[in-house]
Image (cartoon, coloured by chain):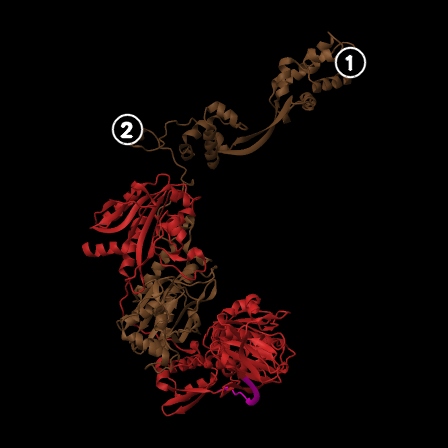
């Protein structure tokens, strides 16, 4: 998904037709999987959902698509690309750093404010979203009149100096990575190497350090710029060519004259951009099966032309040709969606089909639900907490020695950094947040704990447990055992309590709960030091039961 | 009126008969011998029954102060000064004899000069007769306390005089209640009140015959009673249970899957390429230390791999990259419920069939009113021969009506990496307008075919947290897991 800002007036100018804003919002923009989130001072904030259609992340791309929907244009968009003479020479030493580069020259371009905003926005969105934060794609724009061709793309020593954009003094490449905001943000992509990639012209003037930053001399594009040089670096040619094509197509739609360049890598010469439209054969039957519509071949062809593809009948199939910058079509199913969108989802008459199937819930879920209702009969209030917690809550505050837990490597906050292995700490935390409320507080929670287990295919297992607590001036072991007693008796079992030394509980007032020889839980009166750790002044008694085990016993014996 | 009389509490019965207009609390205490709180309660109840009206007042009461007490005992300083003057005319000796301090001497000298009773030179001389009458001062002090506003003109003069001097008198603010009987109150107060009404019905009362001969005091049944807190289910769980119930009624079977998943089920089996932006560091959680799980021992894993690499037999081009098994084995907390659908499809299912899951999912989002790092997702799929998009819309429409009750529904094109075509459903809410409530689509052939599924599969997912927030009137997603026991205790029954 990409969120972009587009001027309504500018978009209308690009389409060449005035579409009322309501029509655009409620129908037009939806055709490009977009939604107008907000309009302020004529600037629309549009959310474009399709991650695989970066060509729609700018006013130019949206206009190109909508021209088809509003019958301004039909079929494949046409692009004039002239053969140019600019050369870009690639040095062998970038091979292991960032090996690939492609580019283009755009002449006689008139850049106004809106256009400049769109250009920079598109460049950023492509590099950020589609290019995975510049890892796969970084785009550079330059004032071509300040560059003397041929250009050289090579790795240079980290002590090399130039003045980066947004700075007024020259820095070494190493310094840029350390202090320039872009260097800090993207430096990790090249940092491990002892030389960094540089684009330099034949006068030796440094144009940029891909994928980090342009130089201030050549790399600043303004409304004064007449001729543009454009370059994309990365690791996968298909990716960088797609990005280049999307940029070029946008510039072309703004009436720029596009010229190819020659990228020379040793003996190999590649002319970029590679603008080759692609095609796929689609079965009419497949379209009708998948859509449930009863389209004739010509209907399908007309719809496809509306979504800016060329379509011709080819035997019992339709040959669909689509723009070179589209890389989202892997299967004829992708063409089916385009047909449906042009047909209009809301023009389809939904057909209700009855499928006879018997519904059911997980048995363990139904079992725990019954337990929950039994506990509300005890005046216990059900609570809900996150399964994510932290070691402090799980161990330190409970007076326990750390044991193995499933831990998150990249937590947003330390508060939610490990998966709980017990619900008792969740309940203690809840009680600690309600010390100013009426007592007694009798609460319970049923939920998953995640127990590390190397025998499991995911090295852990979910166990549903029930934890109960009473926080009150009169809370003690007896009160806890009364509730446990009732609950186990209600299920038709007898149980034993075995003595247990547990660091969270008062010695001699805690035990292990055993049914039919199976250890199914623990019960105890909480130690004062644990209460103090949770800022609780009231005594508390708790128990926790493994509901998976209990449910197994119920299935086996009851 | 009888009803009212019978409903009077024991305390009210004691207080009411002695009431008269403008009686003070102190008087009532004196006359009834009850404690102040008992009287306050009785008055409150009487007022609730509209038998009396009360008004809070604050009066200024003139009271005798420290020096006042002293002067009453020892005589006023000026009097003592004059008596001493008769023995000796030297100031020092007078001071000593009359036992006066410097401040008192100064005041007395000023005062006596003003009244033209003495001459002050090297010695003090008495002028004329020592005509100083302090009796009215002493009488005034003896009669204190008095209400300031009720002083006579003469008393007022004395008050002004004395209040200029140090700590002879003081003013105290007395708070009190003024009680005025209403007409009904006046009437009942005159009646002879039965003292033998039965208060609580106790086993003793039942056993004795007292209940046959005596009336029961009538309760004020409108009065507020103390709150009790019986146990309740959590409102969010109640909502989720009702949603599950609806799904079961619609024929859906609940699926299971582990909280910690392999990337294989979360991504690969769903045809999300390994270089997909969603698999980046910042968009999903990763597990520390325990990094790798196992892949299922199934030919289907190889089919998934080949589909990613070259499309296998699915008719797709695939993603054209080298698929890595170790990446697929990486562990992560489940980021979406569709992981469970992938698991279920790989395991094998009954066709036709309807399946759902409602589970916690985890994403490292920035936490705000609409984003939490842990949240519930509800989703599932429907599988049958010849399912198509037109039927998908029909099923979704039915679904949306069932879940939200709204009959106004709109469909929008949308994007999900694993469905093609994809659709989003919005319903019209009476207050909030159009709301996106669910997304759906037909699973890509590149997803179903490698898992051995030949039939079309319609996948859907509901924003269950959002539905819950609407239903429960909650604006912040974090409040679904409210840590406030008062909120839980006050939660309302859900339709």
Q: Which residue is mark 1?
A: B118
- Give the mark nearer the N terminus: 1 vs 2: 1
Identify the image quadrant of residue B150: top right
Q: Are marks 1 and 2 on the same chain?
A: yes
x, y percent for residue A93: 50, 79
Image mark 2: chain: B
Image mark 1: chain: B
Extent of the magenta region: A73-88
Q: Which chain is red?
A: A
Q: Quadrant of the C terminus of chain A?
A: bottom left
Specify few, some or many for label 2: CA neighbours under 10 Å numbering under 14, 14-19, or 20 or more.
few
Specify few, some or many for label 1: CA neighbours under 10 Å numbering under 14, 14-19, or 20 or more.
many
* Above-or-below relation of A400 to A248: above
Along the viewing direction, whichever of B335 and B378 lies nearer the viewer = B335
Shown colour of chain B = brown
Q: Residue at x 37, y 27 (%)?
A: B196
Q: Which residue is mark 2?
A: B208
């Amino acid at each position: 998904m990409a969120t972009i800002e587009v001027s309504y007036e500018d978009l209308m100018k690009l389409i060449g037709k005035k579409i009322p804003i309501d029509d655009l919002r409620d129908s037009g923009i939806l055709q490009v999987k977009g939604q107008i989130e907000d309009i302020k001072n004529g600037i629309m904030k549009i959310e474009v959902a399709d991650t695989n259609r970066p060509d729609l992340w700018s006013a130019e791309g949206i206009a190109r698509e909508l021209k088809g929907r509003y019958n301004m244009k039909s079929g494949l968009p046409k692009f004039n690309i002239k053969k140019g003479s600019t050369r870009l020479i690639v040095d062998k030493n970038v091979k292991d750093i960032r090996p690939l580069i492609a580019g283009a020259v755009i002449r006689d371009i008139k850049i106004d404010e809106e256009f400049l905003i769109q250009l920079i926005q598109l460049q950023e969105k492509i590099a950020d979203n589609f290019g995975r934060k510049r890892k796969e794609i970084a785009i550079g724009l330059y004032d071509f009149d300040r560059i003397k061709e041929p250009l050289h793309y090579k790795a240079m020593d980290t002590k090399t100096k130039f003045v980066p954009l947004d700075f007024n003094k020259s820095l070494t490449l190493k310094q840029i990575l350390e202090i320039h905001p872009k260097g800090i943000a993207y430096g990790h992509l090249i940092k491990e190497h002892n030389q960094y990639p540089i684009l330099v012209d034949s006068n030796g003037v440094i144009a940029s350090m891909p994928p980090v930053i342009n130089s201030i001399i050549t790399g600043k594009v303004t409304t004064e710029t007449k001729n543009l040089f454009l370059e994309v670096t990365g690791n996968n040619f298909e990716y960088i060519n797609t990005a280049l094509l999307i940029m070029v197509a946008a510039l072309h739609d703004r009436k720029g004259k596009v010229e190819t360049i020659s990228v020379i890598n040793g003996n190999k010469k590649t002319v970029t951009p590679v603008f080759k439209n692609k095609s796929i054969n689609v079965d009419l039957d497949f379209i009708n099966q998948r859509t449930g519509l009863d389209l004739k071949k010509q209907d399908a062809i007309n719809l496809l032309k509306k979504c800016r593809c060329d379509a011709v009948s080819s035997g019992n199939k339709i040959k669909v040709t689509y723009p070179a910058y589209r890389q989202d079509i892997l299967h004829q199913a992708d063409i089916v969606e385009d047909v449906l969108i042009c047909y209009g989802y809301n023009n389809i008459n939904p057909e209700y089909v009855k499928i006879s199937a018997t519904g059911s819930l997980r048995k363990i879920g139904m079992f725990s639900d019954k337990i929950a209702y039994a506990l509300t009969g005890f005046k216990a209030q059900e609570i809900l907490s996150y399964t994510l917690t932290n070691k402090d809550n799980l161990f330190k505050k409970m007076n326990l020695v750390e044991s193995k837990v499933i831990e998150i490597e990249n937590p947003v906050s330390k508060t939610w950094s490990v998966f709980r292995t017990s619900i008792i700490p969740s309940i203690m935390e809840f009680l600690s947040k309600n010390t100013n409320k009426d007592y007694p507080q009798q609460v319970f929670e049923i939920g998953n704990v995640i127990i590390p287990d190397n025998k499991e295919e995911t090295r852990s297992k979910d166990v549903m447990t029930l934890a109960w607590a009473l926080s009150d001036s009169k809370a003690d072991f007896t009160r806890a055992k009364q509730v446990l007693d009732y609950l186990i008796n209600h299920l038709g079992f007898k149980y034993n309590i075995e003595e247990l030394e547990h660091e969270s509980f008062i010695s001699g007032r805690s035990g292990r709960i055993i049914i039919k020889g199976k250890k199914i839980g623990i019960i105890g009166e909480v130690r004062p030091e644990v209460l103090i750790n949770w800022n609780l002044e009231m005594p508390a008694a708790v128990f926790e039961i493994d509901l998976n085990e209990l449910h197994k016993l119920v299935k086996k014996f009851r | 009126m009888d009803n009212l009389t019978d409903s009077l509490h024991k305390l009210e019965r004691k207080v009411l008969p002695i009431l008269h207009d403008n009686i003070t609390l102190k008087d009532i205490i004196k006359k009834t011998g009850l404690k102040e709180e008992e009287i306050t309660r009785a008055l409150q109840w009487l007022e609730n029954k509209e038998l009396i009206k009360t008004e809070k007042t604050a009066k200024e009461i003139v009271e005798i102060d420290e020096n006042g007490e002293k002067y009453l005992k020892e005589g006023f300083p000026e009097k003592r000064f004059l008596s001493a003057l008769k023995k000796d005319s030297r100031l020092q000796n007078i001071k000593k004899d009359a036992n006066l301090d410097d401040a008192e001497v100064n005041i007395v000298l000023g005062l006596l000069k003003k009244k033209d009773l003495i001459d002050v030179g090297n010695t003090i001389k008495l002028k004329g007769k020592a005509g100083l009458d302090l009796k009215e001062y002493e009488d005034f002090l003896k009669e204190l306390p008095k209400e300031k506003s009720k002083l006579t003109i003469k008393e007022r003069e004395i008050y002004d005089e004395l209040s200029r001097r140090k700590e002879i008198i003081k003013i105290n603010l007395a708070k009190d209640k003024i009680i005025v009987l209403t007409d009904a109150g006046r009437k009942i107060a005159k009646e002879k009140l039965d003292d033998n009404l039965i208060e609580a019905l106790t086993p003793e009362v039942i056993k004795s015959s007292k209940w046959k001969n005596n009336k029961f005091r009538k309760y004020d049944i409108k009065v507020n009673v103390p709150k009790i807190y019986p146990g309740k289910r959590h409102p969010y769980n109640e909502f989720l249970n009702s949603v599950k119930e609806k799904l079961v009624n619609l024929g859906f079977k609940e699926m299971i899957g582990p909280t910690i998943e392999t990337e294989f089920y979360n991504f690969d089996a769903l045809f999300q390429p390994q270089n997909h932006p969603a698999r980046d560091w910042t968009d999903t959680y990763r597990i520390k230390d325990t990094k790798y799980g196992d892949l299922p021992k199934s030919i289907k894993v190889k089919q998934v791999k080949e589909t990613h690499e070259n499309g296998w037999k699915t008719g797709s081009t695939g993603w054209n990259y080298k698929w890595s098994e170790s990446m697929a084995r990486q562990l992560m907390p489940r980021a979406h419920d569709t992981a469970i659908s992938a698991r279920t499809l790989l395991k094998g299912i009954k066709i036709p069939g309807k399946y759902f899951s409602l589970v916690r999912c985890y994403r490292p989002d920035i936490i705000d009113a609409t984003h939490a790092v842990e949240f519930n997702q509800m989703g599932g799929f429907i599988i049958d021969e010849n399912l198509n998009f037109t039927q998908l819309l029909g099923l979704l429409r039915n679904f949306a009506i069932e879940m939200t009750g709204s009959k106004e529904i709109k469909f929008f094109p949308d994007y999900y990496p694993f469905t093609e075509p994809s659709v989003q459903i919005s319903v019209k809410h009476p207050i909030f307008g159009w709301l996106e409530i669910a997304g759906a689509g037909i699973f890509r052939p590149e997803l179903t075919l490698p898992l051995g599924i030949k039939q079309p599969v319609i996948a859907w997912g509901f924003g269950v947290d959002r539905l819950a927030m609407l239903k429960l009137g909650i604006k912040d997603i974090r409040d679904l897991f409210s840590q406030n026991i008062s909120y839980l205790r006050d939660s309302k029954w859900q339709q």
